[in-house]
Amino acid sequence: MAHAQVAEKPVPTTDFSLLIDGESVTAGTHLDVTNPATGAVFAQCPAAGRAELDRAVAAARRAFPAWSALSFDDRTATIKRMADVIKANVDSLAELLTREQGKPLQQSKDEIGRASSLTEGMLKIRFETETIVDDAEKRIELRYVPLGVAGIITPWNAPVNLAIGPLVSALYTGNTVVLKPSPYTPLSTLKIGELIRDVFPRGVVNFIAGGDQLGQWMTEHPQIDKISFTGSVATGKKVMASAAGTLKRVTLELGGNDAAIVLDDVDPKVVAPKLFFAGFVNSGQVCMAIKRIYAHEKIYDALCEALAEEARKWKVGDGLDPATKLGPIQNRMQYDKVVEVIEDTKKAGGKFLAGAEQPKGNGYFVNPAIVTGLDETSRLVREEQFGPIVPVLKFTDVEDALRRANDTRYGLSGSVWSRDPERAAAIAAKLEVGTAWVNQHRATAANVPFGGAKESGIGRTYSDLGLKAYMEPRVVSILKTLG
Ligand code: NAD
């Protein structure tokens, strides 16, 4: 739950509402929402309980037959109207997103813009009935039908993008939706709910904010058919266990501990800014951020120095300040965790080439840190730090680098960097991940499946593979004569 802090002119609760059955509604309780740049509560929004959840699910069920009966073209037209409404309100939404999440304003705009472009991309994917056999005797067809009501549960690091991706996937494939944002960042999602209220038929889209328990109730709910969950591995395991009670379909997009392997032939000055961006944007609070760098001994020292130079350039501050390149950590709990990892790294003998000292004040700010001198057993290397601190580890033999990169229960993504893309691709293909990039990191697209291997998730988002996870395959097998 969001932490209550010293109140700083809270915005009246009535500024935000839940979206249930086509109506903007309030609730008996509320969430306090903290601005991580100040550490103070700046807004409150309604918090749904069981009654609101049941109403939202019932509305989604009522809306399902008509929505699922529409053609892909008809649903596309409505979803495009939603994307247009979001685009038209990007400035106000981005400011709200920065206030609740912390990221620099331009990055909030980028996040909302990206949600729109991914939407457009997904709406181009078409599903036709597949014919498996068609001969004189029989025809066997494979159709895809919507599942019913999809429950979508989202995290706090990219609340708009990670809501719109599953939302569009579910709606486009004919499902109706009950969506719950993180209690730390409910506002931009609820505001979108208000803006799109009249775009959809009643009950097709329901947005309910609430605490962790609301998420658990969703995973148990007998009238929800599918859960799309984006969040931590630990919660993902609880979601899967809980969804087993009703055998809900699940898509789990979980955490990562991505490795970047940098080969001996690169120019450190050229790759350092790219690696730094992929590791530190959104202050490292990205599932697919680079979280470990393995650098060949030949370029190791020069690369470490070039990364430290980048770290010194990136200004940390309030996301509303145009000079800011790195905002605060999003919430107090995560901030305390990152500070703990920094202390632990110092005790483990890590050498800080940048970011050893932390800013003072009430905001949850952390300076970007580049660390050397650690081995594979340290917490910073083994865990998902989800903050602006990245270890650089040395290797001599590329097979050894691969073994160390793969020695983890995470398997979201990874990358290999070289002037020779084919050499790098052969190595990248051996990474035990859902996505292995060459000379890039964090590159996703609407027509490319994204998701985790191992404990980084189950299933994929985007692409026909991701969208099919919101549908049930149905075989229709026809014998052409009765005999
Ligand atoms: P979290 O797991 O703490 O919470 C995510 C959501 O789950 C929140 O809405 C929360 O209220 C809800 N929740 C909490 N307990 C629940 C329960 N028992 N049942 C159902 N729902 C519950 O994650 P977070 O801290 O908000 O997000 C950060 C994590 O998300 C990181 O590990 C990050 O790597 C991961 N993430 C993954 C992806 C991806 O695409 N793979 C994308 C973004 C973030």
Image (cartoon, rainbow, N blue to C red):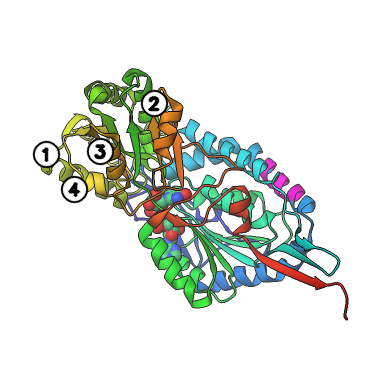
Mark 3 lies within 8 Å of ligand 1 (Cβ measured): no
Amino acid, disc 2: Ser
Q: Which residue is tagged 3?
A: 361
Distance (Cα) linking label 2 and label 1: 30 Å
User: Which of the two discs, 4 and 2, labels the residue nearer the N terminus?
Assistant: 4
The numbered mark at residue 418 is 2
Q: Which mark is residue 349?
A: 1
**Number of other residues with Cα within 10 Å of mark 2, as a class: few under 14, some 14 to 19, many 20 or more:** some
**Residue 441 visible within the image:** no
Please state the horizontal and vertical placement of residue 130, each as a whole percent of the image: 74, 58
Q: Quadrant of residue 456?
A: bottom left
Check disc 1: other Cα within 10 Å, few if <14, some if 14-19, many if 20+.
some
- Which amino acid is tagged 1? Gly
Residue type at the position of mark 3: Gly
Disc 4 marks a residue whose amino acid type is Thr
Magenta stretch mostly in which secondary structure?
helix
- Judged by depth in the image, the label closer to the viewer, 4 or 1, is 4
Quarter of the image where one finds residue 474 = bottom right
User: What segment carries the magenta color?
Assistant: 76-84
- Sequence-wise first label, 2 or 1: 1
Q: Nearer the viewer, residue 135 or 99?
A: 135
Question: Mark 4 — residue?
Answer: 377
First of labels 3, 4 by sequence position: 3
Q: Are marks 4 and 2 in contact (CB under 8 Å)?
A: no
The 10 Å Cα crowd at callout 4, few under 14, some 14 to 19, many 20 or more, is: few
| Coordinates of residue 291 in the picture (x, y in percent) | 32, 40
Q: Is residue 432 left or right of residue 482?
A: left
- Label 4 element class: loop
Q: Is residue 370 left or right of residue 73?
A: left
